[in-house]
């Protein structure tokens, strides 16, 4: 009679193994989801938007002066939108 249950028991073991694998995958995906939510919150923040605008678009606030570091041996064009020399009065 025990032989009749052997195929069923083997199937149960395989399903239990699959459950463990899927639970591990679920945990990994939940961690990734949490990280992505944190990234989304950061990239949506005013602090990031300002930092990006300063770094990529040359944003300067009133009273600030844009400083572009020189690279040895390279001539850099002025940033877009800078039509006049801010040092001239």
Image (spheres, rainbow, N blue to C red):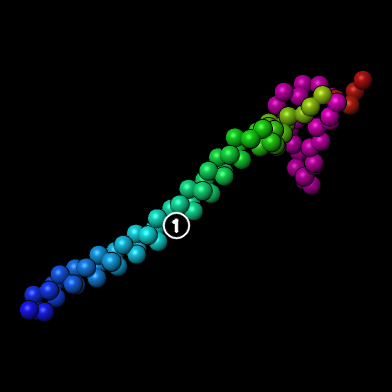
Q: Which residue is mark 1?
A: 28
Q: Which quadrant would residue 83 be assigned to in this image? A: top right
Q: In the image, is residue 78 part of the stretch drawn in magenta?
A: yes
Task: Please state if 19 lies on the left or on the right of 64 as rendered.
Answer: left
Which residue appears at 55% of the width and 40% of the height? 40
Depth check: 69 or 39 in front? Answer: 39
Report if residue 18 is visible in the image.
yes
Name the spot of residue 77 as percent of width and height, x first: 73, 32
Q: Is residue 4 left or right of residue 55?
A: left
Quadrant of the image containing the C terminus: top right
Q: Main secondary structure of the magenta part?
A: loop
Element at badge 1? helix
- Residue lying at 31% horizontally and 62% vertically, measured from the top left: 19
Label 1 Cα neighbours within 10 Å, binned few <14 / some 14-19 / many ≥20: few
The image shows residue 83, relative to residue 23, as above or below, that is above
In this view, the residue farthest toward the front is: 1
Residue 3, placed above or below residue 48: below
Task: Say left or right for 3 vs 40.
Answer: left
Location of residue 31 in the rendering, given as x and y in whole percent from the top left corner: 49, 53
Instruction: Decide if residue 52 is in sight here.
Output: no
- 45 vs 2: above or below: above
Q: Position of residue 85 (x, y in %)?
A: 84, 24
Q: Quadrant of residue 2?
A: bottom left
Q: Nearer the viewer, residue 68 or 25?
A: 25
The residue at 24%/70% (across/down) is 13
For this rendering, which residue is in front, 39 or 9?
A: 9
Region in magenta: 63-85
Q: Give percent across and percent down for residue 42.
A: 61, 40
The quarter in which the N terminus is drawn is: bottom left
């Amino acid at each position: 009679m025990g032989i009749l249950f052997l195929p069923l028991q083997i199937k149960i073991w395989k399903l239990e193994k699959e459950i463990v694998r899927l639970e591990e995958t679920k945990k990994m995906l939940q961690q990734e989801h949490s990280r992505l939510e944190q990234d989304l919150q950061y990239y949506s923040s005013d602090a990031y938007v300002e930092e990006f605008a300063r770094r990529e678009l040359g944003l300067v606030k009133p009273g600030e002066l844009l400083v572009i570091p020189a690279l040895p041996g390279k001539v850099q064009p002025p940033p877009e939108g800078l039509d006049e020399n801010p040092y001239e009065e």
